[in-house]
Amino acid sequence: MKLKTDSIRMVMLDLESCLTWDGSQTNIWSPNGLATFESYKSLGHDEFIYTVSKLIEGGYINGKLCPANNTIGDIYVYSITWKGHEFLDNIRDPKVWSKTKSITGKFTSVSVSLVSNIASQVIAKIVEDTMHLQ
């Protein structure tokens, strides 16, 4: 299965809006848990679960997958990591995301960390251009 940057962005923005500051766990797999995520509705079950699992694996969110009967029994998410927040801060703005995607779309393969770096450079360019206007 392919890890898609649009999916990562969508899930991360969803998680950011629902996680609490105290680090209490959010059981995504709870009876109503999945239904509360717009990204779940948009991406579908498999892509959403795959994206969350890779975000945990990649260190963008603190969480754990609890396997049961050759599938996932529960998914707990505790917080977004520093690395995850850096990624979000780089790609949050729709204008920055659009420009970043236009740049990365020219390549067949681009890592998530490279996407974040390109988005950071896009932001820096926008700031630079804005400063020259003043």
Image (cartoon, helix red, strand yellow):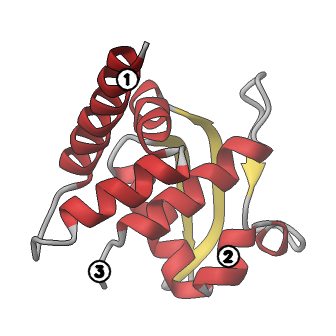
Which quadrant holds residue 82?
Answer: top left
Left or right of 15 on screen, residue 24: right
Residue at 45 percent across and 74 percent down: it is 50
Q: Earlier in the sequence, mark 2 or mark 1?
A: 2
Q: CA distance from mark 2 to mark 1?
A: 34 Å
Image quadrant containing the N terminus: bottom left
- The x, y position of residue 83, in whole percent, is 38, 31
Secondary structure at badge 3 equals loop
Give 38 or 63, whichever is nearer the viewer.
Answer: 38
Q: Earlier in the sequence, mark 3 or mark 2?
A: 3
The disc placed on residue 127 is: 1
For label 2, the residue is 40
The disc placed on residue 29 is: none
Give 22 or 87, whichever is nearer the viewer.
Answer: 87
Residue 21 to residue 121: above or below: above
For label 3, the residue is 2
Residue at 12 percent across and 70 percent down: it is 109
Residue 34 to residue 17: above or below: below
- The x, y position of residue 101, in whole percent, is 31, 63
- The x, y position of residue 56, in whole percent, is 44, 50
Residue at 37 percent across and 23 percent down: it is 127
Which circle, 2 or 1, is nearer the viewer? Answer: 1
Left or right of 61 on screen, residue 114: left
Residue type for callout 2: Tyr
For disc 3, the neighbor class at 10 Å (few under 14, some 14 to 19, many from 20) is few
Q: Earlier in the sequence, mark 3 or mark 1?
A: 3
Residue type for callout 1: Val
Outermost residue to the right: 32
Q: Are marks 3 and 1 in contact (CB under 8 Å)?
A: no
Secondary structure at badge 1 equals helix
